[in-house]
Image: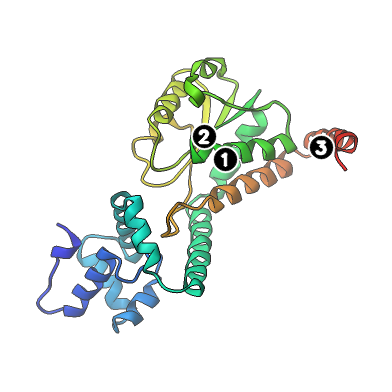
Amino acid sequence: VGLDNLIYDDARKEFSLSMMTSFGADGDEYISVDDIAAKIDISTTSVIRFCRKIGFSGYKDFQDSVRMTFKHELTLPDKFSKAVSTGNDDAQISRTVRNTINCIEQTFNNIPPALICSASNAIIDAKRVFCFGLKESFALAHYAYTRFLTVRSDVFILSAGQSGEIESVLSLGKDDVCVFFLFHRYTKPAPKILELLKKQGTKVILITSPPYDELEDNATILLPCFVDINGIKNSAVAPICLTDHLCNCIVAASGDKTLDYMRKSEVLFKEFTF
């Protein structure tokens, strides 16, 4: 049953809530329960009760479902129309900053610390670390490559899928780790490469955005990131923050080994930088 079909004769305000959230009349899928209650002049308790009435565990569950609906229905022209209709420059800046901060907070609130620890330990223990991403995700893969190379040796970019080349996937083995960036919309080769890495026994740390049902079976460790800032394109800020945090965890966990490597790197930098 679509949210827009849920009309209650005894609760017109609840229907207004449904309409606002279903069709994005507020222009902000990250709106808090307090703000949406204030917008339609009902209590936060009523908002939560409404969400539970239509089958969700609470407001956050309801909000996530609506956001995923927007994410997969909006085309680039749709996003353009929405962006140009959302107010003046100050409003745009405020919305972008707020939604970007929400992406970071939701990302770290939804990843258990133990999972991040497992990911950083996998990177420490790997014989080699490969970073992979296609299209916009290639920029994230390259960023991760430069960061991980700062805290350990034998870090590489996996070039498979670039310019039609695919053979480099075969060079990865069971002792290697691939940090794999993949966000909607998926390029066709990326899920196939992910599946192939699993078949080869390579450990995969998958950094992706929900929903990821079709991907998670091929990931050794899955780190979900929130990237939708209700704009023309997704934001790379949360994946970048997560990558930086992984580097800090690697340093904290590996101790003198990383320190020795960084000292050698510093000698090299003095020769080639100024």
Residue 203: x %, y % from top left: 53, 27
Task: Provide the secondary structure element on which disc 1 rests.
Answer: helix
Residue 54 disc label: none
**Amino acid type at mark 3:** Met
| Residue, disc 3 | 262
Task: Provide the secondary structure element on which disc 2 rests.
Answer: loop
Mark 1 or mark 3, earlier in chain: 1
Residue 133 disc label: 2
Quadrant where the image shows the N terminus: bottom left
Residue, x 57% and y 15% (percent of image)? 171
Q: CA distance from mark 1 to mark 3?
A: 24 Å
Can you name the residue that lies furthest to the left here? 9
Q: Are marks 2 and 1 in contact (CB under 8 Å)?
A: yes
**Amino acid type at mark 1:** Ala
Front label number (1 vs 3): 1
Question: In screen coordinates, is 31 left or right of 151?
Answer: left
Residue, x 40% and y 43% (percent of image)? 184
Q: CA distance from mark 2 to mark 1?
A: 7 Å
Q: Is residue 7 above or below residue 123?
A: below
Mark 2 or mark 1, earlier in chain: 2
- Density class for disc 3 (Cα within 10 Å; few <14, some 14-19, many ≥20) is some
- Density class for disc 1 (Cα within 10 Å; few <14, some 14-19, many ≥20) is some
Residue, x 39% and y 77% (percent of image)? 35
Residue 250: x %, y % from top left: 69, 40
| Residue, disc 1 | 139
Question: In screen coordinates, is 181 left or right of 35?
Answer: right
